[in-house]
Image (cartoon, grey):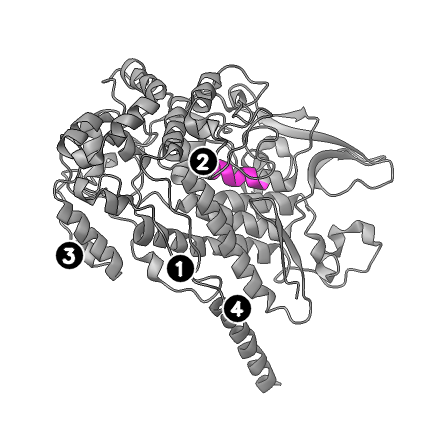
Amino acid sequence: MSTSRRQGAYSARVSAALEAKDRTHPNHKANGDEQKYANSAYLMSFTKGLAHKDTTGLLADPQDFMAFRQAIDDGYIDAFTNRIFVPDCEEGRRPWEAPTAGVAYDLQGPDCQAVTMAPAPALGSDELDFEMAEVYELALLRDVALSEFAETGGTGISASVTRLNDLAYAKADFPNRPRKVGGTGFLTKQTAFRGSSPGVEKGAYVSQFLWIGNGDPADGLIGFGPQQISQKIAAAEVNDDYMTEFTDFHKVQQGCNVNAVNGTSGGQKFTNTRRFICTPRDLATYVHVDALYQAYLNACLILLGQAAPFDTGFSTLAGMRRSFPTSGPRNLNAGGFALYGGPHILTLVTEVATRALKAARFQKFNTHIRARPEVLAARLEKAAEIEEKHPQVCGVLTTMCGDLADTIEKVRDHNGTTLGGNPTALLPMAFAEGSPMHPAYAAGHASVAGACVTILKAFFDTGAQLVERTRPGMDPVVGFFGPKPHDGTTDRFIQYVPNANGSALVQQEIDCPLTLEGELNKLAANISIGRNMAGVHYFSDYYDSLRMGEEIAIGLLEEQALCYPTDPVVMSVPKFDGDTVRIGAR
């Protein structure tokens, strides 16, 4: 028996290895800005942490970037300390974050270099114009209530939507990375800044999984074993924006640890209150210090606590039959736990994050090395001076300034009048340190979002709807439920939203039901675009990273499916683009 088991275990590992081996390793293609602007001090590449000129914000010596690039390509972490010149900072320095993670291997799931992303929008493209405008507008909207991001909301985002719709990329119907639009083909208050996947435009802007609890949904408390997790977050101060003065921007680009001296608490200033997420600033705060897979672990706990239905592919498995009451009464003498149960899902939804992060690091450092939005804003602020010193830029920066003139005017007013500083075109940042110490593309948060949410979609019935269900003679129960039984049961379509000051959640009846698929897609968009709200990412960072994370999770599940010899299961996973992949079907 031991010999046959040993051979069986070996065969399963070989099958999984062959599954991985047969995946085509793609060519990784960048947008060419690194090479195109090499003679312009690599102005569109990530150079944070190197020495920069205090006049233009460009590299002091392009040779520093070449050494940085060589260290990345070599893949040894000590080179980042021993071979690259970095400026001194009296505050201490921030290190680059895991620049060699993209060369590591894993024993399950796609290799981190077996997945890829399309080239990012290049400087001079209508798409980059548009997504830079989006980041600017989100910074201006940082303290506007998210309840305004709806057709029934007030006028808080109307002007931003109008300015975005007037740009060439919107008029061309978003040809590369589509946005959600209204019936006229343009952005509306309900669809702007929402992401791109099915269901994200339905209901409140924020996913229910960032608000509700898994006992009484309205209390926002998530049971986590004997403990509770509150969905309320620390509220940051209004207009708590940073890096709008060029001296501050320059210091941050040098890699200085400004949080050590500026009196902030981890890069932000907070009030003494906690509340449910109410504004873009709240979302930015959440994704500043979250545990990266935190939102998806919480979502899994909520779904398990509600006994939400599993994917119908589990209906024949003994441990899952209680999730499918329409199959008739059965004795439940075996239940799911280590296999197809709570611990199985909870482990996977966190484990897959490590795969997504390594893949994101390879794209960030080894492939695209894309500058952050804070840098492009600085290039626009210094456009005339940069183009005078580097005529090979050929007016592309000043042209972009003209294209975004209306938005930049509002940014200058915010930085000058609202914040009481100079009226610069610099991007107001939610965090004192600005972006992290790694390039923009891929986005780590979005890659993890795509991977973790895909695991949840694989295990749970994504067609379930959030309802208040009342059975004859019983009190109402709220949760994500499957089809309504034919026994006099009634369902009300509902959602929860915060009250005006965010101190409590209020139940609302709605006409169109919120589906589990839509709310998971919305959760992924909220976390990813929350980073855009902070000023540290673009829409394309969200869009392509999400799909890369999805591919990683699907590959991991495909390999795991080979390891279930006696109780096989077929999972149906709706993808972020709307089609469905079936895992385990042979």
Residue 521 within the magenta-colored segment of the rendering = yes
Of mark 3 and mark 1, the one earlier in the sequence is 3
The image quarter containing residue 481 is: top right
The residue labelled by disc 4 is 19
Whether tag 2 and tag 1 are in contact, CB under 8 A, the answer is no
Residue 38 within the magenta-colored segment of the rendering = no
The residue labelled by disc 1 is 113
Of mark 2 and mark 3, the one earlier in the sequence is 3
Tag 1, which secondary structure?
Answer: loop
Tag 3, which secondary structure?
Answer: helix
For residue 291, say whether it is visible.
Answer: no
Whether tag 2 and tag 4 are in contact, CB under 8 A, the answer is no
What is the spatial separation of the Cα atoms under label 3 and label 1, in whole angstroms?
27 Å
What is the spatial separation of the Cα atoms under label 2 and label 3, in whole angstroms?
36 Å
Q: Position of residue 230 (x, y in %)?
A: 52, 36
What is the spatial separation of the Cα atoms under label 2 and label 4, in whole angstroms?
33 Å
Between circles 2 and 3, the one closer to the viewer is: 2
Amino acid beneath label 1: Gln
The image quarter containing residue 208 is: top right
The residue labelled by disc 2 is 529
The residue labelled by disc 3 is 82
What is the spatial separation of the Cα atoms under label 3 and label 4, in whole angstroms?
40 Å
Q: Residues within 10 Å of mark 1 (few under 14, many from 20)?
A: many
Task: Identify the magenta region.
Answer: 520-527
Q: Quadrant of the C terminus?
A: bottom right
Between circles 3 and 4, the one closer to the viewer is: 4
